[in-house]
């Protein structure tokens, strides 16, 4: 007993003891310095340069590039796309997590792997597969043409490609969270006479709300910023099928750098807001996950 | 009938939830992906082989996989360093830096692409420093490597960080007590523990880099045989209405992605078993 107590006290309290499991100060400083240099070269300077280049020609040029008609229509299309893609994937994420986390069935691991597939597919291929189906030479192309329905080089194609790219975000966040929380609370609600929807909205949803929000934030950031997949199906029609990232590309290729970086800076602000929200919500998710563990062990 | 397929539960909604999940998964992901394979099956094997092995295509594989491998290796090394520094040391601004590590996940790739291009071009802030030595970064294969390093940066940090945080200090103390130097402790105690996570992060960064398009096309210069990545070649073929060619290349990329996905799943499974 005495021996274990003595060992437990030693680590933090005696400086001489601690040194054996730490690095010398100069090594520590060198490591921190190298890490920061790497992050500065590859992260911080690129981030700062977006704003610098956008504002280089003055605030007037900056705001003029944001309120110009094509920019406004690109911003609108980006918002519409995210407003459709995020709720769709949210409903899917909840349904998939409910089936996977609350029930035991065969083929579950295969299903989880299949949900992850869009993460490992190149964005260009994500766009291509919809062209193969809905494009003029695609399976449904002739039929769609006869009925005058446009999917490729139109808004529906952009939405579809975005849904594909952001498909796993919310499901991936919810599945481990709901698995950790177990099924006891829902079972209690059902035994007490609640129906399925009541159980979900009053018991499950309050438990997963932070995880759901976290997934939705990540999903939204990717939906608004997707470039490759959308680029394949969009057709780049100014003022009509251009999203913000595509608008950035067009301006850049026209050597209109100030305007390109101005629109890009809006997307960079979106990224920073996403990161800020993410770190706020991350704390809450960790808390609710711990709660889940407590319920399980109790 | 359902009883053999799943275990009994008092909770409702299984059929609805699983039914919707499978329908949505099939419509959005599985059916469209199968289109690529079915369209390619229209080609005969020699035709397919001829398309995916032309010199220009092979050069694009070499660049895509070479640059992705180099970027993932650099990210493994520096990602480990960043994770170590963030977990073990205290310094000003640490929380903000920790949050900013995820920037490449959140920043649209087109924005990253134009920012890196303007920085690493011969007259850019960073490119200017290399210009006197005759090193050109933007519009060369080196630029592709820079973009892919940016894109893959968070993966290793975020896979290694939690493992380092969970590591019991007793092990290191025991090693030190037994007379191990700091380097020996790192090499024999710490590194073996974090190795599966490091490998997983490396594989994730590599897989992401192989498919990357948005950030690369701005900085690459896109010269055939020199700085043209495979995803760009797919788009080029598509724009020339060469659907068969584009789809054949896509199938090659898809098969490689699926092998990588399988490998990553195995690595994560191994990593969890080691941690348990």
Image: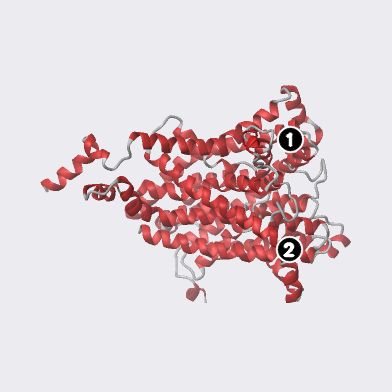
Image coordinates of residue A111 in percent, x first then y, are 55, 65
Left or right of A52? Residue B11 is: left
Residue B55 circle label: 2
State the image quarter where residue A152 is shown: bottom right
Image coordinates of residue B101 in percent, x first then y, are 52, 40
Residue A260 circle label: 1
Query: Is the residue at mark 1 from the same chain as the one at mark 2?
Result: no
Residue at the outermost right position: A146
Residue A252 circle label: none
**What is the basis of the colouring in this image?**
secondary structure
- Number of numbered discs visible in the structure rendering: 2
Residue at the (44%, 66%) spot, across then down? B9
Image coordinates of residue A20 in percent, x first then y, are 26, 42
Q: Vertical placement of B66 versus B26: above or below?
A: above
Residue at the (51%, 36%) spot, across then down? A37
Q: Within 10 Å of the Cα at label 1, are there few (<14), some (14-19), or many (20+) other Cα atoms?
A: many
Badge 1 element: helix
Camera-nearest label, 1 or 2: 2
State the image quarter where residue A27 is shown: top left
Measure how far apart labels 1 and 2 are at the Cα level: 35 Å
Residue at the outermost front position: B133
Front in this rendered view, residue B217 or A30:
A30
Is residue A192 visible in this depiction of the protein?
no
Badge 2 element: helix
Left or right of A4? Residue A255 is: right
Q: Vertical placement of B104 versus A204: above or below?
A: above
């Amino acid at each position: 007993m005495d021996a274990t107590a003595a060992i437990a006290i030693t680590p933090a309290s005696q400086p001489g003891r601690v040194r054996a499991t730490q690095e010398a100060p100069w090594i520590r400083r060198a490591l921190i310095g190298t890490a920061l240099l790497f992050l500065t070269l590859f992260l911080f300077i690129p981030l700062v340069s977006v704003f610098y280049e956008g504002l280089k020609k003055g605030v007037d040029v900056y705001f003029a590039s944001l309120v110009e008609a094509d920019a406004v229509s690109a911003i609108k299309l980006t918002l519409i796309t995210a407003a459709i893609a995020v709720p769709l994937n949210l409903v899917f994420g909840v349904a998939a997590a409910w089936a996977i986390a609350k029930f035991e069935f065969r083929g579950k691991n295969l299903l989880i792997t299949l949900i992850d597939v869009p993460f490992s597919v190149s964005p260009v291929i994500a766009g291509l597969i919809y062209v193969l189906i809905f494009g003029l030479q695609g399976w449904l192309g002739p039929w769609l043409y006869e009925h005058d329905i446009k999917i490729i080089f139109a808004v529906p194609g952009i939405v579809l490609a975005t849904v594909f790219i952001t498909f796993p975000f919310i499901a991936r966040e919810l599945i481990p969270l709901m698995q950790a929380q177990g099924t006891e609370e829902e079972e209690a609600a059902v035994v007490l006479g609640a129906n399925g929807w009541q159980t979900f909205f009053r018991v499950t949803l309050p438990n997963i709300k932070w995880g759901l929000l976290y997934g939705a934030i990540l999903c939204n950031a990717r939906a608004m910023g997707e470039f490759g997949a959308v680029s394949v199906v969009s057709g780049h029609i100014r003022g009509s099928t251009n999203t913000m990232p595509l608008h950035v590309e067009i301006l850049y290729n026209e050597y209109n750098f100030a305007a390109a970086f101005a629109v890009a800076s809006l997307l960079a602000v979106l990224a920073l807001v996403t990161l800020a929200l993410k770190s706020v919500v991350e704390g809450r998710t960790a808390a609710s996950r711990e709660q889940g563990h407590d319920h399980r062990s109790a | 009938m359902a009883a053999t397929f799943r275990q009994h539960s008092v909770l409702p909604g299984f059929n609805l939830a699983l039914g919707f999940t499978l329908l949505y998964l099939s419509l959005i992901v599985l059916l469209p992906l199968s289109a690529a394979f079915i369209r390619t099956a229209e080609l005969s094997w020699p035709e397919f082989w001829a398309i995916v092995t032309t010199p220009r295509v092979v050069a694009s594989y070499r660049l895509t996989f070479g640059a992705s491998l180099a970027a993932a290796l650099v990210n493994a090394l520096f990602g480990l360093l960043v994770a170590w520094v963030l977990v073990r040391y205290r310094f000003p601004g640490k929380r903000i830096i920790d949050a900013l590590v995820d920037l490449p996940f959140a920043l649209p790739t087109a924005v990253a692409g134009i920012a890196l291009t303007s920085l690493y071009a011969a007259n850019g802030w960073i490119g200017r420093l290399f210009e006197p030595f005759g090193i050109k970064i933007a519009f060369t294969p080196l630029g592709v490597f820079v973009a892919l390093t940016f894109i893959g940066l968070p993966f290793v940090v975020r896979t290694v960080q939690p493992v380092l945080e969970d590591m019991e200090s007793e092990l290191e103390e025991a090693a030190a007590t037994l007379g191990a130097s700091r380097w020996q402790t790192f090499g024999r105690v710490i590194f073996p523990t974090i190795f599966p996570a490091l490998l997983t992060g490396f594989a994730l960064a590599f897989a992401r880099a192989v498919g990357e398009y948005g950030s690369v096309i701005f900085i690459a210069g896109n010269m055939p045989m020199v700085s043209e990545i495979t995803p760009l070649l797919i788009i080029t073929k598509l724009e020339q209405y060469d659907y068969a060619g584009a789809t054949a290349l896509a199938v090659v990329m898809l098969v490689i992605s699926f092998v990588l996905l399988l490998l990553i799943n195995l690595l994560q499974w191994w990593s969890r078993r080691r941690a348990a």
